[in-house]
Image: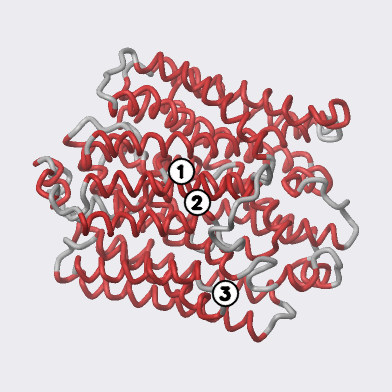
């Protein structure tokens, strides 16, 4: 309850909720068509699209999961961040033009729409399944992060014990569902503008405070070196993880960006395609600012624990809220808390809409059915999906960042090869795309389940240090090449307008 | 250019596969090479329609990613020779900042400069 006793914190957080609610209500009045609901009527400009992309991409994963992951495995976790400088331009170089042009010639609201236009209904169906599986993981990570924040703010653990996190998650779910299902992606995009700006501001402020609280970089290093819990291993270039894990993080979070529907989706919304010239820079700079919170708290919190100024954490994901509780002034704690909530909620509402679109549009179309009243159905399905994701997160029972890595990896392994190569090379066949997506999703999910289940003894398929997502991404890509090489018969069957888009 | 990019990407993926499955130091180097070359290969693939003027810049991209491979390799060497981690955070941050700045050059300078070559004024519709 200590946070609630600080009025500036509560006022800042309430002010944020009031602003988001107002934007949600305003956006709901403007949502008339399926185009408004899924791609914001193609109205957003450069800054809105850039900040919305950052807000959608960065989430509870960065604000809570990141510092928690560093607390557990040391500086090796920073390899997730190392590619931030170029992932946005990688996206624009490899797929942005094809996606935007395709949206100009065909009704394109979702990534499975793109896959369907290029490879047909079978591949689109697999793409919708990939989107669904990844959405449940990603949404679950956001709900888990939201629960941990609510739990800390309201002090529910002292009252409810083991039931604290599920109850806190349920409270957070209710708020996310309100404005997401009311306004759809239009609400998402415009609340994302506020949220993206707030996230960057909060991250810069807390970075400075974290370094100062830890005694500067020198003080942090000294504290960690002398600690039995962290020690020199924490400071190793790869942290406490093998090289293959650290480079696996780098690999999945760089190349895997090409398969993230919540980021790719933004290219359909651009008002003027020429804005793409400066879009990567807006995204890279805003993302880099937001990541300062991960670096700052990831180093400072273990150092504070090592020096005895902070109790050892019950759960590494508590690193951010515990720091706010003990070291931040009320107004800054409120700002960071609102920034973290912003990150979580913006990503959550993006995924509710993307997941709903996969279920009410993409899967039925892949099966040859046209669903009526997609907006209404999308809102209902969004609610169901959110509760399913909350249950999945509860069952997964690990760090936010690891659940987030699974979800990011599902999108990467399922969609990145088919989109990155398939939209640029006519040699990729329909069958190859379907196989690549299916193999990517099944391999990632299968390896993750095999590794985590303890019911039966199963043979080890990949070394324990290798990330399932990294291995699945490699296998998915190689499947695309091998099946394309073996199956040359379908190359000529690309629709004329899609072929023109690929050749532009 | 497209064939070169595809070949480069296949080599990068095979290097990565080897890195994940083969234990030992060689695997680390294969991973570093694959991690650095693959994005370069995909960028070359995505900008295959860029005009002649942009080709120099595209080879610049390749060189930049080779630099990335160099930085990742330097981290591996550092790990091998300085396992004690003394002052490691400062050096690590310096190296990650270098990595970030080097790749931000792609995003902030190379991408805007080459933009017109692969997305010309009349390229808003196919």
Q: Secondary structure at mark 3?
A: helix
Nearer the N terminus, badge 1 or badge 2? 1
What chain does badge 1 belong to?
A: A
Asked whether residue A272 is in view, the answer is yes
- B107 or A411, which is in the foreground? A411
x%, y% of residue B38? 37, 66
Is disc 1 surrounded by few (<14), some (14 to 19) or many (20+) residues within 10 Å? many
Distance between the alpha carbons at the discs numbered 3 and 2? 21 Å
Q: In this figure, which residue is indicated by the disc labeled 1?
A: A51
Q: In this figure, which residue is indicated by the disc labeled 2?
A: A286
The reply to whether discs 1 and 2 touch (Cβ–Cβ < 8 Å) is: yes
Q: Is residue B67 above or below residue A309?
A: below
Dividing the picture into quadrants, the one containing residue B15 is bottom left
What label sits on residue B95 in the rendered view? 3
Q: Which residue is pictured at 56% across the width and 48% down the height?
A: A448
What chain does badge 2 belong to?
A: A
Q: Which residue is pictured at 70% across the width and 80% down the height?
A: B83
What label sits on residue A227 in the rendered view? none
Q: Secondary structure at mark 1?
A: helix
What chain does badge 3 belong to?
A: B
A322 displayed left or right of B79: right
Dividing the picture into quadrants, the one containing residue A431 is top left
A441 displayed left or right of A336: left
Q: Is residue A228 above or below residue A159?
A: below
For the residues beneath circles 1 and 2, the answer to whether they share a chain is yes
x%, y% of residue A483? 26, 54
Distance between the alpha carbons at the discs numbered 1 and 3? 27 Å
Q: Secondary structure at mark 2?
A: helix
Is disc 2 surrounded by few (<14), some (14 to 19) or many (20+) residues within 10 Å? many
């Amino acid at each position: 309850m200590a946070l609630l006793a600080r009025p500036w914190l509560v006022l800042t957080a309430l002010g944020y909720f009031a602003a988001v609610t107002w934007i949600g209500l305003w956006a709901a009045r403007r949502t008339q068509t399926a185009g408004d609901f899924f791609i914001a009527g193609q109205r957003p400009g450069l800054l809105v699209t850039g900040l919305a992309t950052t807000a959608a991409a960065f989430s509870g994963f960065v604000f809570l999961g990141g510092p928690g992951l560093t607390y557990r495995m040391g500086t090796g976790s920073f390899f997730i961040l190392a590619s931030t400088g170029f992932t946005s331009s990688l996206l624009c170089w490899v797929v942005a033009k094809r996606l935007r042009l395709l949206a100009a010639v065909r009704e394109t609201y979702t990534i499975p729409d793109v896959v369907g236009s290029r490879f047909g209904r079978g591949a689109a169906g697999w793409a919708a399944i990939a989107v669904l599986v990844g959405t449940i993981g990603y949404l679950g990570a956001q709900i888990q992060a939201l629960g941990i924040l609510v739990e800390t703010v309201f002090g529910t653990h002292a009252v409810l014990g083991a039931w604290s996190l599920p109850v806190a998650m349920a409270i957070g779910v209710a708020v996310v569902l309100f404005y997401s299902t009311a306004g759809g992606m239009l609400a998402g995009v415009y609340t994302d503008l506020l949220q993206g700006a707030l996230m960057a501001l909060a991250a810069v402020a807390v970075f400075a405070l974290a370094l100062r609280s830890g005694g500067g970089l020198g003080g942090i290093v000294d504290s960690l070196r002398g600690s039995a819990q962290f020690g020199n291993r924490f400071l190793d270039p790869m942290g406490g993880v093998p090289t293959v894990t650290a480079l696996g993080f780098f690999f999945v979070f760089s190349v895997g960006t090409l398969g993230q529907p919540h980021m790719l989706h933004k290219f359909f919304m651009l008002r003027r395609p020429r804005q793409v010239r400066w879009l990567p820079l807006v995204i890279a700079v805003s993302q880099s600012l937001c990541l300062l919170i991960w670096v700052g708290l990831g180093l400072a919190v273990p150092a504070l624990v090592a020096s005895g100024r902070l109790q050892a954490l019950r759960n590494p994901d508590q690193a951010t809220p515990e720091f706010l509780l003990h070291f931040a002034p009320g107004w800054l704690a409120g700002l960071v808390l609102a920034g973290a909530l912003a990150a979580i909620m913006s990503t959550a509402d993006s995924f509710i809409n993307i997941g709903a679109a996969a279920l009410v549009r993409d899967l039925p179309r892949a099966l040859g059915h046209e669903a009526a009243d997609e907006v209404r159905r999308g809102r209902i399905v969004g609610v169901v999906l959110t509760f399913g994701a909350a249950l999945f997160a509860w069952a997964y029972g690990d760090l936010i960042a690891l659940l987030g890595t699974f979800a990011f990896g599902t999108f990467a392994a399922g969609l990145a090869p088919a989109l990155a190569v398939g939209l640029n090379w006519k040699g990729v066949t329909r069958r190859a795309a379907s196989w690549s997506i299916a193999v990517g999703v099944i391999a990632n999910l299968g390896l993750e389940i095999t590794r985590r289940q303890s019911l039966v003894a199963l043979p080890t398929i990949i070394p324990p240090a290798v990330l399932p997502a990294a291995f699945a991404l490699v296998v998915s890509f190689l499947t695309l090449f091998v099946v394309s090489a073996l199956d040359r018969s379908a190359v000529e069957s690309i629709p004329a307008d899609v072929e023109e888009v690929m050749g532009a | 250019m497209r064939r070169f990019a595809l070949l480069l990407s296949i080599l990068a993926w095979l290097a990565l596969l080897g890195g994940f499955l083969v234990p030992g130091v060689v695997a680390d180097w294969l991973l570093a090479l694959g991690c650095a070359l693959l994005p370069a290969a995909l960028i070359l693939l995505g900008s295959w329609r860029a005009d002649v003027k942009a080709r120099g810049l595209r080879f610049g991209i390749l060189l930049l990613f080779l630099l990335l491979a160099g930085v990742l390799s330097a981290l591996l060497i550092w790990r091998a020779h300085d396992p004690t981690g003394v002052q490691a955070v400062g050096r690590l941050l310096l190296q990650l900042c270098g990595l970030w700045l080097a790749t931000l050059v792609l995003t902030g300078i190379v991408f805007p400069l080459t933009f017109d070559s692969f997305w010309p004024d009349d390229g808003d519709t196919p």
